[in-house]
Amino acid sequence: MSDHHPLLQPFHTRLHSAGRMRVWSVVISIFGELVQPRQQSISVQELLALTRHIGIEENAVRTALSRLAKEGWVERRKQGRLAFYALSESGKKTFLAASERIYSHSFESPSASWNLAFFKDPPSAVKDHLPVGFALSRQWQLVNDDDASKLHQADVMLFPTEPVDVPSWALDKLVPESLNRHYTELLSDLAHLNSHPDDIAKLSSLSAMTLRFLLIHAWRRLVLRHPLVPQGLLPSSWPGAACHEIICKLYPRLVNQSEGWWEVPTPKSGLTSLEIRFKSP
């Protein structure tokens, strides 16, 4: 990486220390976070400039692009000797569903009601599908009202409940411990950034763009593991909510500092779509 700025370092370290890197997943984060709002494609040269800045080899990126194109996530077009990529229609549809969770203004479901769902055959983790609930056991899940309304299988029984005062010991046990740990680690990575928000304005546009997609990549990998939490069921000190609060505050600064990197500016409609991310409707 050409710029070991203190703001980027925790996220660079996180990316390279989490075992075998899934380069295709990083590339998808770039498309969803940076490319899609522009309603344009990205050149291979632009993509390589971003990934080179975080120490990913060119061959790995090209292999990831080939895989994503074969799986229908992205489409390739040639313009002279240059190659450009954009999300395919199916890729846009999949990312749109995920973006509602990634860029939600709230960590809680709009409804305070929730349901216990008993599945005859427990739902498996299907690629590109968001989880419908918190797994309490192999066949029981805690499902918020919005997601419960989407369950139409004949092999699931729903037990609606009324809002109750949940004791703190129960709140602490409802959220899986592994999620608590991962959010705590992300909160630690966010600490310096949160303590020095004005330093974002000192970043180069390339470094700000890099930090922006690394931050959303880390956030996406956690927040898509679970649904919106029903109101009243979050521990008061849950690190996931603290991470969300910090990201909501810092994201507009990162957008403002990074958008100047593009040679062709993002159109006004794209900037508008960025402005509403993490904002209440």
Image: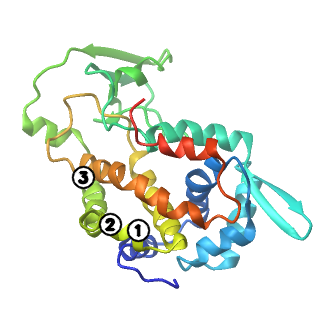
Query: Which type of secondary structure does the marked residue at label 2 adopt?
Result: helix
Specify which label sits upstream in the sequence, 1 or 3: 3
Observer-nearest of 209 and 172: 209
Q: Quadrant of the C terminus?
A: top left
3D distance between C-alphas at marks 1 and 3: 31 Å
Asked if one can make out residue 127 in the rendered structure from this viewpoint, the answer is: no
Task: Report which residue position mark 2 lands on.
Answer: 198
Q: Amino acid at mark 3?
A: Asn
How many C-alpha atoms fall within 10 Å of the one at disc 1: few (<14), some, or many (≥20)?
some
- Please provide percent x and percent y for residue 37: 61, 47
Q: Are marks 2 and 3 in contact (CB under 8 Å)?
A: no
Q: Which residue is pictured at 35% across the width and 34% down the height?
A: 228
Task: Report which residue position mark 3 lands on.
Answer: 180
Q: Which residue is pictured at 44% across the width and 54% down the height?
A: 221
Q: Nearer the viewer, mark 2 or mark 3?
A: 2
Q: Nearer the viewer, mark 1 or mark 3?
A: 1
Q: In the picture provided, is 212 more to the left or to the right than 181? A: right
3D distance between C-alphas at marks 1 and 2: 6 Å
- Please provide percent x and percent y for residue 243: 29, 53
The correct choice, above or below, for 239 with respect to 168 in the image is below
Q: Amino acid at mark 2?
A: Asp
- Please provide percent x and percent y for residue 229: 30, 33
Q: Which mark is residue 201?
A: 1
- Please provide percent x and percent y for residue 168: 8, 37
Q: Which mark is residue 81?
A: none
